Amino acid sequence: MQPSLDTILAAQNQTTLESRLEALQCHFTWDLDPSESLLLRRKDNLEDIGTEEGNSWLGHIYNLRGFVQYKLGFTEDAQSFFNKAAEAFSKIRNADEGPWLVVNYGNLAWLHHHLGDQAESQAYLSKVNALMNKYPSPSQDQLHPEIYAEKGWTLMKFSPDKKQAADYFQRAISMQPDMVEWNTSYVLALMYASSHSETVVEADLLEKMRLAKEQDPENLYLAVYYLNQCAKRGEKIEEEACELAKKMLKNPVSSYSGIRPLLKVYSCYLSIDEAIKFVEETLRTHPDERYLKRCAALCYKWKLTFFRDSRPEQSVIDRAISLHEEVIALYPHSSFIRKIYLANIYKQFNNNQVKAEQIYQELLERDLEPADKQMLYNNYAKHLYYNRQYDKSTRNHMNAAAITHQSFYRENSITTLKKNRGRSHMWREIEVFLANLQEP
């Protein structure tokens, strides 16, 4: 039977709608296809930023939270966050409409399309077109700077390609240079993208950081990273670090506050005990903030791992364990790494191999992403070696190395296998394995 004219027209309309949706600039078209484990981690990270009024990125935060909720299957939550994004933009920009809503309306057009409400999807497509006609880009061959800025901010959170994020911010700034927060994010993206971000950045980037800090004096997050670079160059930073700590104690708790990088500065250039003292003081002021507990757990991990001339006091070990257990409960879907940390604390400092083994067995039974599985095999191999289970340790190093994901853990396992092949009765098997190892 031949399809009716109505059926043919409906199919054509559907094709036209989908092609218009594909042409939109929004989270649904930016090739953001993360794994579920990454989505869950990003969900927690976005929640930890907080929703304090005055945050210039609040609309972008809600937009991305909406997209994450959609990808996780929570469509009602997604719509709620997209609506909150529109409200946040109106307050921040002090206007009911503007080009900053193009991405938001695009997200809503896609969401209603996926929900089967094509009329509402069409309505949002019309709103996008109206905005783009009313607020064209200052440059004909470029997207609107508001779109570049949101795309750059999204990639900062979702993509390992920080250079691309920096490029989008640079394009936005070239057309709209008065947006201070865009310039701050541009400089931070450059720093993340720098191959020297963990050491000393180039002089021109340091100067960009200094200028951005002057333009955005309330941004303590940027101030801490600039201070860190000053410390790496041998400058005395104690007084300024203490001033930043005092300011942070007065501010709302947020992963944007700069507390985590400041704790790292404290631990590297002042003392780990001062870092712990500061984070514990902050926790007394905000006892229910899970992000602070996460930072505190990290500080105690640093103390146990990197800053010990002798066996730590039992009270320090107990506090490290209790904080890690609490943080794991507070982040049930994104605590994979912290569970490994906890297992290592049990193994090395609490003489509780049974608890450590239980944690590893629970993790080994999970369906993990290749990168997480590789990290797990590498750490479990070390745990087994510590317990003198040398053959099982070797097999787990092989498991880690066999996963073709380039990482520290893969290189560490390969190095360990090469070192052990001359003194293990499994040397022939190790030789064959290494000879046939595939590169990522």
Image (cartoon, rainbow, N blue to C red):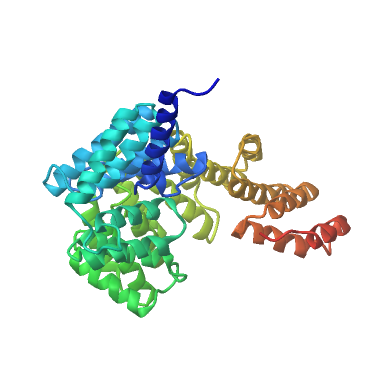
Query: Eyeballing the image, is 379 above or below 76?
Result: below
User: Which quarter of the rendered picture does the N terminus lie within?
Assistant: top right
Q: Nearer the viewer, residue 45 or 302?
A: 45
Where is residue 375? Give x, y as percent: 61, 50
Q: How many marks?
A: 0
Residue occupying image coordinates x 29% and y 76%: 207
Where is residue 407? Give x, y as percent: 60, 58
Q: Is residue 372 left or right of residue 298?
A: right
Query: As drawn, which residue projects farthest toward the bottom?
Result: 203
User: Which quarter of the rendered picture does the C terminus lie within?
Assistant: bottom right
Query: Eyeballing the image, is 213 above or below 351?
Result: below
**Is residue 183 visible in the rendered structure shown here?**
yes
Where is residue 122? Give x, y as percent: 30, 34
User: On the image, which quarter does residue 206 sit in?
Assistant: bottom left
Query: Eyeballing the image, is 253 above or below 208?
Result: above
Q: Nearer the viewer, residue 7 or 221?
A: 7
User: On the image, which quarter does residue 272 sit in?
Assistant: bottom left
Residue occupying image coordinates x 31% and y 42%: 106
Q: Nearer the viewer, residue 92 or 350?
A: 92
Query: As drawn, which residue projects farthest toward the top?
Result: 1
**Is residue 267 visible in the rendered structure shown here?**
no
Where is residue 285? Give x, y as percent: 25, 42
Residue occupying image coordinates x 44% and y 31%: 11
Query: As drawn, which residue projects farthest toward the left?
Result: 94
Q: Is residue 188 left or right of residue 298?
A: left
Q: Is residue 282 left or right of residue 158?
A: left
Residue occupying image coordinates x 38% and y 27%: 115
